[in-house]
Structure formats: structure tokens, C-alpha cells
Image (spheres, helix red, strand yellow):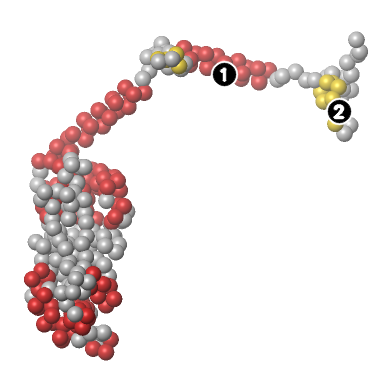
Amino acid sequence: MGLIERDPHTGHGTTGHEWNGIKELNTAVPWAVWAFLIAAFAFALTWWILMPAWPLGTTYTKGLLGADERQTVAAGLRTAAERRADWTGRIEKERFSAIRSDPALMRDVRQAGHALFGDNCAACHGVGAKGGPGFPDLTDKAWLWGGSPDAILQTLRVGVNSEHVDSRVSQMPAWGRDGMLKDDAIRNAVAYVYSLSHPGTAKEALSGDAAAGKAVFSANCSACHGASAKGNTQMGAPDLTDRFWLYGGDEASIYESVYNGRQGHMPTWDKRLTPVERKILTLYILYLGRGAR
């Protein structure tokens, strides 16, 4: 049996391994490492005994403490529902005006409404509810179907051109594609409509004749948009005299709307959201726009 070579500086034996003149010492594992490993094993063993841990075919070890995360989550949900019941009950029973005048209640509405809007409405209207081409901006005061709380609530419930039996129905005819108006008449009508929201526009800047377009508008468009083109919230017909445009207010966009028509869609939330959730969303939308009351 050979003698163990010892390091002259530390007195520890070597393992016999050497790399580029550096010899590996055969030192003992530090006591702190042993203590940590022993403590970790003891903790793990205790945890296995106290808590659910090991699968046993169709079941598992339940643990002495009988902990059950499903029951914990269910209890948390029940507690949250009980806490919400007070203010959601008030939302359900109280009038819009009373709710909106209560700062504490509106704080709960904003928190819940933000989550509801993000989960259900933001995909189309955007996180900030600013909308986009074909999707209304909910923060302005241009409401196709009316901006009162009751009108917004009804729109949420039945949708627009949706499968709901009471759905709001709105469609802009395709005046050009379906051959109802000739192209010159369409361009004149477009020039007139453009001039309504851009007063003072020079004739040379328009591709059609606005003066001639007024007669085209009166004969074909006023039935929905009104003689003064202020729109009709009973039919979802927009006001053509303001600067709020759903599909764009430049001449080219207006021409596209008149020529090919428009038919928007909003789903019904009657079965997807509860009446209280729809009311919260209505209040939240009104809060975002600080608009119609």
C-alpha cells in the first residue's frame, strides 16, 4: 500500500490527480454543506408527510395537514363573490345617475370595468377604447345608436347586425356596386358630404360637384341621415357634418363607403355577460369618454 502524498502547505492528502503541475487536494466536505444537506432532507421528508406529495395510481398521499388547493381556490372565489355582492347589488338596483355620483362605487366600477373591457371589448375597440377603421372610438361623443346609458346598455345587450332577435340593424347600401347610382352622381354626393364636414373647401379641390351632390343626397341619403345630414340614432346612421368618421373622412374613403356600402357588426353580449357586467361596462365606457349622460 503506497503512502498518501500530502500537501506541504495545508497538510491535506492529495487524490493523485494533477493538471499542469496543480495537484488536487482530498479535502473533507465542509460541515456547513453537510448541515445544509441534512436540513434540506429533513425539510423534504417533513413536507412529504404533512402535504399532498406522492401519486398512488388513481389517488395520492393526502398529507397529515389535509391541504387541498382546489378547496383553497374555491374558498377564495366564494370570499371574493361575497365581497363583490355588496357593491354589485347596488349596481344592479340603483339608477345610472346615482351610481355615477358615488365616487366610492365608481372606483369599483372602474376597476371591474377595466378588466371586463380588456377581456371582451379591447380586441376591436383597442385598450384605450379609441377604436380604429370600422370600430368606433368610444371616448368621443359621436354615438351611432345614442350615447345615453340606456342606449349604450341596449347596444351591448343586443349587438349590431348580430344573431340576437332584437339586434340593432344597420346597413349602408352599395350605391355604386349595386348600380343604384351612376358614378358621376356618387362623386357629386361624396363632394357634398365632404363639404359638410369641411366647410370652405374650394370646388377645385373636389372631384365632384358639391352643389349637384346636394340634390343627390336629398333624394337618396336623407331618409337615413336626415335632411340636414345630422344622422339618426334610431337607425345607426352617422352624423355627416362632424369630424368623427368610422371609416375615414377623406374623399376616397367616403367614395368607398358610398360605392361599396358598409355593414358593421357588433356581437350580442346578452348571453356572454351578466346584466350587472353589462351595466358595469356601460358605466366604464361613459367614464372613459366623460360623455353623454
Image quarter of the C terminus: bottom left
Mark 2 = which residue? Answer: 18
Q: Quadrant of residue 89?
A: top left
Question: Among all residues in the image, which is located at the extreme front?
Answer: 179
Vertically, is 276 above or below 141?
Answer: above
The amino acid pointed to by label 1 is Ala
Q: Which type of secondary structure does the marked residue at label 2 adopt?
A: strand
Question: Among all residues in the image, which is located at the extreme right?
Answer: 2
Q: Is residue 114 left or right of residue 16?
A: left
The residue lying at 81 percent from left, 23 percent from top is 25
Between 82 and 9, the one nearer to me in the picture = 82
Whether residue 236 appears in this view of the structure is: yes
Between 212 and 129, the one nearer to me in the picture = 212
The residue lying at 28 percent from left, 56 percent from top is 125
Q: CA distance from mark 1 to mark 2?
A: 34 Å
Residue 270, given in percent of the width and then of the height, sits at: 16, 44
Q: What is the crowding at mark 2: few (fewer than 14 residues within 10 Å), some, or many (at least 20)?
A: few
Vertically, is 274 above or below 169?
Answer: above
Image quarter of the N terminus: top right
Residue 107, given in percent of the width and then of the height, sits at: 23, 45
Whether residue 257 appears in this view of the structure is: no
Q: Quadrant of residue 39?
A: top right
First-in-chain label (1 vs 2): 2
Q: Is residue 165 left or right of residue 6?
A: left
The numbered dot on residue 40 is 1
Q: Is residue 63 left or right of residue 28?
A: left
Q: Which type of secondary structure does the marked residue at label 1 adopt?
A: helix
The amino acid pointed to by label 2 is Glu
Vertically, is 99 above or below 210?
Answer: above
Looking at the image, do the residues carrying marks 1 and 2 touch, with CB atoms under 8 Å apart?
no
